[in-house]
Image (cartoon, helix red, strand yellow):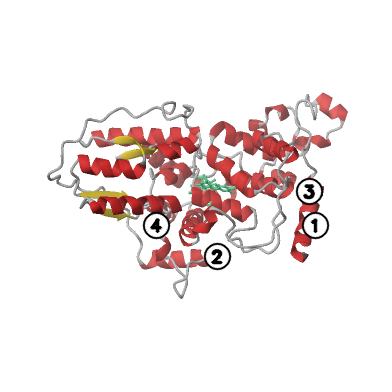
Amino acid sequence: MFVFDESLLQSHQFGSECVSFMLGCLEELASSLAGRGITFQWRRGDQVEQVVQAAREWKADVVYWNRDYEPEAIERDRLTQQQLGKLGVAVRTFKDHVVFEASEVRGATGEPLQRYSAYRARWWNRWHAMTPAVQSIPVPLAAKNTAPLPISRPLPSASELGYDPVVPWIEPGERNAMKRLRWFTEGPIHSYAQSRNLPAVDGSAKLSPHFRFGTLSPRMAIHAALNALAKGGRVSRPDVLTWVDELIWREFFQQVLVAFPHVAKGPFKAVIVPSPRPAGSERDRLFRAWCDGKSGYPIVDAGMRQLNQTGWMHNRVRMVVASFLIKDLRIDWQSGERYFMQHLVDADMAANNGNWQWCASTGTDAMQGYRIFNPALQSKKFDPDGAYIRRYVPELVGVPVSKIHEPHLMSLDEQDRYGCHIGADYSTPVVDHQLARQEYLNLGKQETTT
Ligand SMILES: Cc1cc2nc3c(=O)[nH]c(=O)nc-3n(C[C@H](O)[C@H](O)[C@H](O)COP(=O)(O)OP(=O)(O)OC[C@H]3O[C@@H](n4cnc5c(N)ncnc54)[C@H](O)[C@@H]3O)c2cc1C
């Protein structure tokens, strides 16, 4: 049974990409259940009320669900369990979203871990101590005393839920997840350590929405990666282990959210960082330019346009655009976090919040001082021939490699020659990176001494 939560739908904290992907996954689930003679049920409304009402109508004696680790979901599930208890209905919950829950990977004295490196070491200890098996398909339970279930209704469309219907750029459903996992672990995983940083290359798994929506289990993915390692051949150990490390980052941020739920509403740690630019028209102009991919920094603009057009953005570029918003434009990281949630197909509170806080230097990052990415240097290093930029910023298609990372440095002659006029065809940079960087560092010093 699936409940479309009315208040969540109304809040629009997720976007059309995310909702369309989820609907695609539900369509596949409904048809795969139908193949097993099970009618998929869905309802719309308040989640707690709908589950309790369904349990009553169907004379359920037990309700099963997988645990969710977001603070509001924990409270929702607690309330549901309480109300079902009053009806005499039992509840059984399962771990499914992660390999290890927060309580399973702790420090020496049982404390939750705040540093990724320590968490990673303990995570591997745990894995080696009791490697969790991939779950087999469960045997059907014998139904007893239940009322007959209503026949399945077609799922609502994205428009009926109040969202734009879009064809997800990453294909939804378990079958597609398995196909992509197989493709990735048979090939690209073996060069992952290098190619994962190149946004023009299809070098990462692009499985994040599947982990987000449960169409791929992290246990299965890790076993597939380690099997690729075990097969030898052209396998590269550091590549495979780097990929597994990324899945451990995912688990790390899930446990941060459980152990430190205050991160959902504010900084992980009370550090002194430069205050964001005050509210007003200048802040709004800069934020708009960032959102629309019109900042005048090609790598930032390519990233934001990739996000707006596809609902996905390359990880390296996510870090660059986040640093640019927070440190060059001095806009609060929560605005960026919200924008990502509303546009990403893999929008996930734990991963999104953890990474935004990492970029804002308010999170679990062990680095002293402020990490400020230089967009032009990042671009030259990771998109050396400008292929990614040209894919998403067509105004720059005719600009040669020597100028594509900083097109505003072209002379007027060059602008004529390459058919791209700065300020007309392509934006003038909204800020000067070197000045903005210095200003950020100066503000940081002032706030530390006051
Ligand atoms: C500012 C910012 C916001 C982000 N928001 C999200 C988000 O809302 N949802 C989300 O799933 N990821 C988020 N990430 C992490 C990362 O960018 C994506 O998980 C990754 O790009 C997904 O692509 P992939 O499946 O090809 O990853 P791969 O490189 O193939 O990695 C495999 C898996 O590991 C996990 N993973 C990889 N990198 C990270 C990371 N840095 N943190 C946590 N998990 C990771 C993902 O589940 C991913 O699918 C964010 C990163 C940044 C810098």
At label 4, counting other C-alpha atoms closer than 10 Å, the crowd grade (few under 14, some 14-19, many 20 or more) is many
The residue that label 2 is drawn on is 115
Mark 3 in CB contact with mark 1 (< 8 angstroms): no
Mark 2 in CB contact with mark 3 (< 8 angstroms): no
The Cα atoms of the two marked residues, 3 and 1, are separated by: 10 Å
Across and down, in percent, residue 337 comes to: 58, 46
The residue that label 4 is drawn on is 99
Q: Quadrant of residue 25?
A: top left
Mark toward the viewer: 1 or 4? 1
Identity, as a three-letter code, of the amino acid under mark 1: Asn
Residue depicted at 31% across the width and 49% down the height:
65
Q: From what the image shows, is residue 154 above or below residue 89?
A: above
Residue depicted at 20% across the width and 48% down the height:
139
Across and down, in percent, residue 270 comes to: 62, 63
The residue that label 1 is drawn on is 442
Identify the disc placed on residue 436: 3
Across and down, in percent, residue 440 comes to: 76, 53
Q: Residue furthest bottom?
A: 109
Q: Is residue 386 visible?
A: no
The Cα atoms of the two marked residues, 2 and 3, are separated by: 30 Å
Mark 4 in CB contact with mark 2 (< 8 angstroms): no
- Mark nearer the N terminus (2 vs 1): 2
Mark toward the viewer: 2 or 1? 1
Apparent side of residue 81 relative to residue 305 in the rendered image (left or right) = left
User: What is the secondary structure assignment of the residue under circle 2?
Assistant: loop
